[in-house]
Image: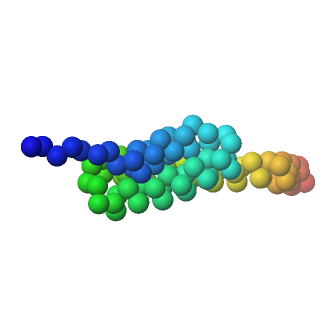
Amino acid sequence: MQEKRKPNVMAIISLILSILSILCCCLWVLSLILGVVSVALGVLGLRSDNPNQKDAAIAGIVVGAVGFALAVSVGIMHILVLTGVAGSASTAALGAGRMI
């Protein structure tokens, strides 16, 4: 008799959350949280006793890390725009060019 294969739920949830972290990159705080959770669940799914869907766990880790990096970069740009650092640096460079 063949044994019934159970799905690796943590690996599947990791993959779903990592895809959501990429799709929600404009909401960088949510994407940051989803990326961290998806990487953690991917590692747990990879280390679990259930050998099924290890490829989904690896994909969840990789895509979650990309979503995390994307969220960090969007967050940094968002903070720079809100604080006005990006605008003052460009106007300072333009002003310095006129003095010379």
Give the x, y percent position of residue 54.
30, 51
Between 72 and 60, the residue placed more toward the observer is 60
Tell which of 66 and 38 is nearer to you: 38
The residue under the point 39% across, 47% down is 9
Judge left or right: residue 29 versus residue 46. right
Q: Position of residue 74 (x, y in %)?
A: 66, 47
Could you tell me which quadrant the N terminus lies in?
Answer: top left
As drawn, the residue found furthest toward the top would be 23
Would residue 98 appear left or right of 49 to someone viewing this image? right
Q: Residue placed at 48% from the left, 59% from the top?
A: 40
For this orientation, the residue located farthest to the bottom is 47
Q: Nearer the viewer, residue 99 or 44?
A: 44
Instruction: Give the residue drawn at x 61%, y 39%.
Output: 24
**Residue positioned most to the left:** 1
Q: Is residue 95 visible?
A: yes
- Look at the image and tell me whether residue 66 can be seen: no
Residue 55 percent coordinates (x, y): 31, 48
Which quarter of the image is occupied by the C terminus? bottom right
Point out residue 4 in the picture as x, y percentages from the top left corner.
21, 43
Considering every residue shown, the one lying at the far front of the view is 1
Number of numbered discs? 0
Please give left or right for residue 33 compared with residue 92 in the image: left
Q: Nearer the viewer, residue 34 or 96?
A: 34
What colour-coding does the image apply?
rainbow
